Amino acid sequence: MDGVGGALFAVGAIVLFFFLPGYLLVKALWPEKRWRGPQGAITAVEMLTGGFVASLGIFLIVGFVLGNTGQFYASPSSPTLEGILAVLAVIFLALGWVQGAYRKDPPPAPSFVEPPLPGEEDLEPMLGRFQEWAREERRLQREIHRARREGAPSADRARLEEQLQELRAVRRKAERTREEELSG
């Protein structure tokens, strides 16, 4: 194998050993990644680097397994090694095809936002109400304390204490309702 044939063999071996299986595996694992768009250059570097690293890992694992079975003698022209890497590349290509990695429009990326638990949909407004009740309760407690300190008429203090008790009753009722919603 001299000249052009040797050069083509060397390029093919380098691509098969150090790029193709890993790149196809990366495409199968992240089918939504594309080289187009505003993040295209970064994605291209990620995919090419990931393909190289994954190919190295695949190459080492396959070589280790073949070496332990007595089938591999560290020759780059080993038909067993080349055949296994080619079969893995075809498997990864098919897996990527099934995942939609080669379609014109990419599949949607996975969402890492957890869906709300039952009863959590209205959590923010409910928390706002509880915070508002806590502020009002503190305000009424300050008013009652000031009324006692300044010697306000007992009717005013009684009215403030009644408001405070009503507010606490409303809050406790809301807490019980929320606990029932979550438990059953």
Image (cartoon, rainbow, N blue to C red):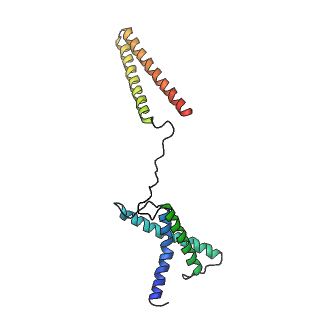
Q: Residue furthest right?
A: 69
The quarter in which the C terminus is drawn is: top right
Q: Residue furthest bottom?
A: 2
- Is residue 27 in view from this perspective? yes
Q: Is 72 rendered above or below residue 138? A: below
Q: Residue 122 location in percent, x, y?
A: 44, 35
Left or right of 150: which side holds 115?
A: right
Left or right of 159: which side holds 2?
A: right
Q: Residue furthest front?
A: 104
Residue drawn at 55 percent across, 71 percent down = 88
Residue drawn at 36 percent across, 14 percent down = 147
- Is residue 53 in view from this perspective? no
Please count the marks in the image: 0
Q: Residue 26 location in percent, x, y?
A: 48, 65
Q: Residue 172 location in percent, x, y?
A: 49, 24
Q: Is 111 rendered above or below residue 164? A: below
Q: Is 153 rendered above or below residue 5? A: above
In front here: 46 or 117? 117
In front here: 27 or 143? 27
Residue drawn at 39 percent across, 16 percent down = 144
Q: Is 27 rendered above or below residue 68? A: above
Q: Residue 161 location in percent, x, y?
A: 42, 15
